[in-house]
Image (spheres, coloured by chain):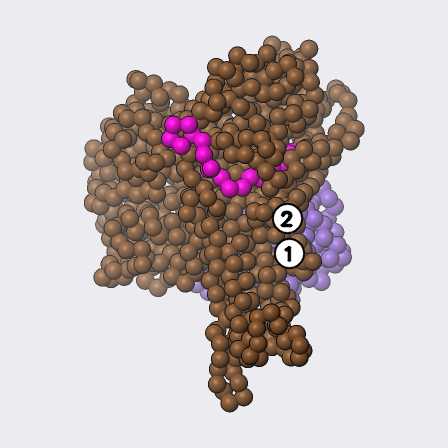
């Protein structure tokens, strides 16, 4: 019987967020604070011949103009290939070349205009397949000479390929020899921007002796930032303190280290001063990180009865000029492109390729949407070829207990009920009448199934400290980042549940400060509830054991003779009671002698037994949990304009347990609409190698008018041995197959087999007018 | 040196305006420390920075601070009175229309301006207002629920509007 977990409890930050109270990084002002502005290259690939900052330095309010050559430093976590500020070459149009530090933002902006840079422009390349050719401009001379993690990153020397991930499961030839039918297509998933409403920002301050560095940053991974900056300056991390305040959305865009090192670097020129930099929306678009950006090809083979026999795929990622942030997206994108299906023979090559667009990093879904779009679309086509209902074909090949996934892991009951998800999502859409084609619209329905496993460092862990106070309430200290998902609220719920305290008696630390909050890997991969919850359970059970020990010391009894319920220990034989509060500092007897230990404990949880994929096969125990689900939709396509309207979008995920169903629904509904954005409208476009759509609405994200007429969310709760109270990751999953669900529905409506996104009205309209693109499917 | 004087959330405030293109959002945030007003795009496109100026919703990131000379401004900090939330704020909480909270102040203020002019707007007017805002987290359905609930709570009166 659960008291708090599973309940729709109101967000703990709700009142603050409707009254303007939460502190985001842009809201912080420090004493002795200066402001930075960054000069961006403006050209996609060029050698820097000279920088003249003389005039800028004389501008009002200017304290320092710093150029890359004054302190040429590199940073990174996995591949160290990125200069903090460019000094010899610029490799994308948003690369920083100089930083002005001044008393006000306006003064810094004015001075920026006075810096003169001479470039020798070089040929540039944006297409990842072009960038792999022998005659392509080489963006880094020797990729192999950079430091990188050798066990899981595989650069191809003297090329633009900084990572080549290979999946070799079974025997490709055998797989396609056994096939009676094959389907194959090229696919494209464009570069997109996270467009979190809060722009990235950071503040950095070295003390006057340059012995300590303090930072404030809109970061999903403050501890990683600390480590990266420490390595960059050669500073012990114990001298670096990073604060992560409230985040105005992340979606992966604030999980990689991108703009923060520039601020720390700038601050190193003015020790004793705090230096603040809040990016403009234009800089967010051109100079932080983008997502996706894949060109790919996939081929599937199947027997007449629908049994899948082989998968072959290449995925080329336009990763921008720095590989640090995208590299593992491509590993996961590669090995999970097979979707939630058992395919005995898989041969996949995923390439992370240097290109001259802004660098690419994590984006909600982390490699899964790219690959699962391909497999989901091809299954649709395969079903037609086999003249078999798609749902039957999918179910025949679904991963299931005892079946083996692409990396060789045997599935068990913990995976949940995937066929159930498919039935429920489909039923929501297919039990409704679909209007017949009329003069204005085509109508169609589609569906797809998905899975996602988190990608994380093998040592990724969460830590939780719990302190019980004299009045019996609990203070719970973790380092999860609140970026909208509601992590403070679910942490509070889980701590209240394990301690058997009312929700109101538990307070979870808000904001993160690496000096006072315990170690946490980072808030990514939809894992914070899962991993943090297990850490809370661990700390909570230690607290209760300590309290029991204290009670036994007071009552001179054995642990078995003491029971615990709702904050109170009871001596079973005598009925005497002691509350958590009475035992909080140890127990104080009548004459003030205190016995026992204070009720404070540290618990932790690390993802279990995860390893890097084998370098030769790309297989291995790469994930410790998977969340499965399915989605379906109905839509209409305007014959006149090509515009697609989503009528009803249904999602079903088996997440084991919803700690707070209302917040889960928030993740699903928001994720679906973000996926609709990526499918119907979002694309970063370039002019002369530089991002052209640098603000809203040029970069169009869903508005109110774009939401589906109706959304349905179904949460399945199959118990498992993985998450806290069975809770599994769900934050990214709603976005993973939104594109193929819509594309399948468009094919159903119009007969057009789209293989790239976004399906903007003009793209759809020109396809509607081009009768050759319509396949009847007969 | 220009002195900017405004009545903000009912109090007379004055500040020195820096030379150059200082926006109302900067004046409120940096000059008066009212950081509840958020700047998401700097171009009046996302609606996070909406405040109420002389009864009208304005995007404060595209409004020159000098244009607010003598104006009456209401910001998100000015809605709750004595610890009691405004009905619109209550509606956002009750409808679970909050995630990261960055777009929330602008949405609340835009609805405040709308309801104070027209306490019972029809769905078309309400949708038109919401369509001026961007939210990247929620998918909007809950924001619609909040707006409708807020309209109910206003109950066709202007009683929750500042004088």
Q: Element at badge 2?
A: loop
Question: What colour is chain B?
Answer: purple
Seen in the picture, residue B123 relative to A146 is either above or below; the reply is below
Q: Nearer the viewer, residue A714 or A348?
A: A348
Q: Residue at x 62, y 69 (%)?
A: A564
Q: Which residue is mark 2?
A: A657
Residue at 43 percent of width and 60 percent of height: A517
Residue A626 counted in the magenta span: yes
Residue A179 position (above or below residue A77)? above
Q: Which label is found at residue B147?
A: none
Q: Disc number at residue A5?
A: 1
Highlighted range, magenta: A614-631
Q: Are marks 1 and 2 in contact (CB under 8 Å)?
A: yes
- Callout 1 secondary element: loop
Q: Between disc 1 and disc 2, whose residue precedes?
A: 1
Residue A696 location, x and y as percent? 51, 38
Q: Name the chain under label 2.
A: A
């Amino acid at each position: 019987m659960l008291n708090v977990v599973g309940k729709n409890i109101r967000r703990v930050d709700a009142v603050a967020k409707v009254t303007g109270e939460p502190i985001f990084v842009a809201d912080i002002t420090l004493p002795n604070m200066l402001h930075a502005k960054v000069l961006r290259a403006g050209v996609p690939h060029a050698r820097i011949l000279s920088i003249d900052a003389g005039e800028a330095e004389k501008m009002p309010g200017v304290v320092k103009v710093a150029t890359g050559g004054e302190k040429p430093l590199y940073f990174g976590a996995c591949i160290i290939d990125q200069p903090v500020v460019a000094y010899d070459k610029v490799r994308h149009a948003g690369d920083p070349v100089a930083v002005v530090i001044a008393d006000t933002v306006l003064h810094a902006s004015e001075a920026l205009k006075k810096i003169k840079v001479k470039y020798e422009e070089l040929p540039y390349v944006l297409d990842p397949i072009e960038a792999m050719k022998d005659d392509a401009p080489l963006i880094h001379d020797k990729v192999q000479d950079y430091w990188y993690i050798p066990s899981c990153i595989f650069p191809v020397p003297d090329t633009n390929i900084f990572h080549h991930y290979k999946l070799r499961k079974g025997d490709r030839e055998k797989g396609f020899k056994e096939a009676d039918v094959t389907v194959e297509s090229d696919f494209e998933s464009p570069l997109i921007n996270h467009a979190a409403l809060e722009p990235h920002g950071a503040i950095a301050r070295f003390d006057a002796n340059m012995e300590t560095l303090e930072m404030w940053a809109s970061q999903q991974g403050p501890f990683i930032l600390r480590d990266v900056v420490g390595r960059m300056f050669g500073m012990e991390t114990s001298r670096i303190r990073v604060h992560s305040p409230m985040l105005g959305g992340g979606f992966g865009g604030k999980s990689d280290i991108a703009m923060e090192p520039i601020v720390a670097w700038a601050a190193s020129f003015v020790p004793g001063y705090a230096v603040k930099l809040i990016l403009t929306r234009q800089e967010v678009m051109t100079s932080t990180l983008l997502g996706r950006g894949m060109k790919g090809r996939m081929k599937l083979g199947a027997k007449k009865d629908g049994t899948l026999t082989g998968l072959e795929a290449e995925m080329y990622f336009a990763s921008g000029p720095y590989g640090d942030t995208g590299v593992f997206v491509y590993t996961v994108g590669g090995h999970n492109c097979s979707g939630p299906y058992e395919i005995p023979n898989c041969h996949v090559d995923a390439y992370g390729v240097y290109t001259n667009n802004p660098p690419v990093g994590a984006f909600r879904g982390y490699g899964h949407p790219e690959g699962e779009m391909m497999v989901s679309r091809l299954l649709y086509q395969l079903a037609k070829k086999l003249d078999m209902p798609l749902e039957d074909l999918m179910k025949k090949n679904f991963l299931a207990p005892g079946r083996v996934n692409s990396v060789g892991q045997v599935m068990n009951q913990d995976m949940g009920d995937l066929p159930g998800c498919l039935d429920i999502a489909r039923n929501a859409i297919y039990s409704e009448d679909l209007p017949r084609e009329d003069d204005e619209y085509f109508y169609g329905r589609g569906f797809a199934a998905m899975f996602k496993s988190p990608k994380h460092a093998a040592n990724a862990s969460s830590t939780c400290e719990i302190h019980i106070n004299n009045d019996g309430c609990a203070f719970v200290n973790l380092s999860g980042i609140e970026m909208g998902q509601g992590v403070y609220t679910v942490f509070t719920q889980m701590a209240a549940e394990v301690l058997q305290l009312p929700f109101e008696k538990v307070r979870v630390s808000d904001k993160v400060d690496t000096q006072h909050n315990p170690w946490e890997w980072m808030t990514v991969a939809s894992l914070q509830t899962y991993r943090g919850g297990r850490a809370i359970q661990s700390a909570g059970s230690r607290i209760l054991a300590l309290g029991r020990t204290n009670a036994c010391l007071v009552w001179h009894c054995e642990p078995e003779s003491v029971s615990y319920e709702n904050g109170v220990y009871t001596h079973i034989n005598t009925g005497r009671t002691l509350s958590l509060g009475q035992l909080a500092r140890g127990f104080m007897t009548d004459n003030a002698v205190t016995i026992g230990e204070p009720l404070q404990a540290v618990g932790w949880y690390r993802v279990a037994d995860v390893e890097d994929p084998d370098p030769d096969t790309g297989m291995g125990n790469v994930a410790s949990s998977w969340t499965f689900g399915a989605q379906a939709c109905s839509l209409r396509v305007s014959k006149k304009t090509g515009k697609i309207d989503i009528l009803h979008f249904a999602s079903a995920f088996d997440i084991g347990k919803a700690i707070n169903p209302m917040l889960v629904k928030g993740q699903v509904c928001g994720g679906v609409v973000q996926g609709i954005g990526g499918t119907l409208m979002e694309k970063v476009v370039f002019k002369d190698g530089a991002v052209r759509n640098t603000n809203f609405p040029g970069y169009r994200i869903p508005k109110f008018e774009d939401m589906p007429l109706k959304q349905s969310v179904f949460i399945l709760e199959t118990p498992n041995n993985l998450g806290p109270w069975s809770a599994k990751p769900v934050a990214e999953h709603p976005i993973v197959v939104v594109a193929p669900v819509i594309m399948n529905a468009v094919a159903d409506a119009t007969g057009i087999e789209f293989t790239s996104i976004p399906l903007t009205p003009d793209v759809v309209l020109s396809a509607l007018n081009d009768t050759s693109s319509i396949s009847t499917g007969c | 040196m220009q002195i900017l004087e405004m009545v903000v959330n009912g109090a007379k405030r004055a500040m020195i305006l820096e030379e150059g293109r200082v926006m109302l959002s900067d004046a409120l945030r940096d000059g008066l420390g009212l950081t509840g007003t958020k700047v998401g795009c700097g171009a009046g496109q996302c609606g996070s920075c909406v405040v109420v100026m002389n009864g009208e919703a304005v995007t404060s990131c595209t409004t020159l601070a000098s244009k607010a000379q003598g104006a009456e401004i209401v910001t998100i900090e000015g809605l709750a009175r004595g610890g009691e939330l405004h009905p619109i704020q209550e509606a956002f909480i009750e409808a679970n229309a909050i995630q990261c909270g960055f777009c929330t102040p602008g949405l609340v203020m835009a609805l405040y301006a709308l309801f104070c002019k027209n306490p019972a707007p029809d769905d078309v007017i309400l949708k038109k207002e919401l369509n001026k805002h961007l939210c990247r987290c929620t998918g909007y359905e809950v924001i619609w629920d909040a707006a409708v609930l807020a309209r109910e709570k206003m109950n066709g009166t202007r009683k929750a509007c500042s004088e």
